[in-house]
Image: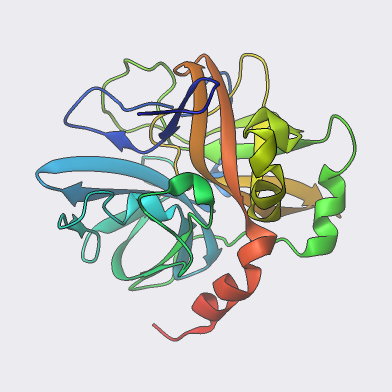
Amino acid sequence: MRRTGRPALIAIGALLAVVPMASATYGGHVVGRSTAMSLAYYTVAENGLISECSGAMVARTKIVTAAHCVRPEVQGRRVAVVGRRARIGNPGPGSRTARIIRVAVHPKYRPLVPQAGFDLAVLTLNRPVGSPIEVAEPKDEAALDRVGATAVFSGFGVTPSDQGWRPRPARAVSLEVLPPYNCVLPSRIRGFARNQLCAASPGRGICSGDSGGPLTVRIDGRRRLVGVATLALEEVPCRSVVGMFTRVTAVRQWVQRQVGRAR
């Protein structure tokens, strides 16, 4: 676990076979059915352990999620993703499932240096499901520029750090978008700001299982995807967490190429 001069910096997928590594949506509220149908929950297997992550539908067969959920950090290990099923929506009769048939990871992602950014992947499903979220354009980020600007994060993660595994509905929290110096040292601010975002709010945040979940803003009445949850700075797991997110506009062209590909 790496130290940054601040709290611990950790990835926020959750291992189901051990105590959760870290940081779900604590302090939030359960989302309604229409919102949940744009959100994905899935698990992956690595060396006998099962991890859970979240994601966002950006097309009816495409999920945007965090690359660290689907790529091992240890050389030589293998993460089983293709062939596993993703659930769209909250647990229950209204949800839909589909099989993951393809995984694409952003070419600039570096598994051993997750804080470098570009922690993004696109999963392809074997059939159309869900209701896509629009990917933000650069002009949409103007909503994040003002002091005190907020965005909404949604994910299927746990709420207390010691919560055991069980089917959970997605929860949403409103987070304040913070200046980069809240997440990185001064020497890294410029690089961080190009492809990442920093957000937190007192008493609300992200926790294990939220990796890959969407950070959104509302523009002209429609949700726009501006970030994807990747890392967390934790003082207290699931109680005092600053979230780090891949800036979607920085990888928008790559995402569009993946979405445009046939299954």
Q: Position of residue 141 (x, y in %)?
A: 80, 53
What residue lies at 83% left-to-right and 35% top-to-bottom? 149
Query: In this rendering, is residue 59 above or below 202?
Result: below
Q: Check the picture and name the quadrant holding the C terminus.
A: bottom left
Residue 174 visible in the picture:
no
Name the outermost residue toward the left: 48
Q: Check the picture and name the quadrant holding the N terminus.
A: top left
What residue lies at 49% left-to-right and 38% top-to-bottom? 231
Query: In this rendering, is residue 237 above or below 187?
Result: above
- The picture quadrant where one finds residue 19 is top left
Q: Position of residue 234 (x, y in %)?
A: 49, 21
Could you tell whether 192 is left or right of 137 in the image?
A: left
Q: Position of residue 79 (x, y in %)?
A: 21, 56
Could you tell whether 111 is left or right of 219 in the image?
A: left
Name the outermost residue toward the bottom: 262
Q: Nearer the viewer, residue 204 or 60?
A: 204
Q: Nearer the viewer, residue 167 or 15?
A: 15
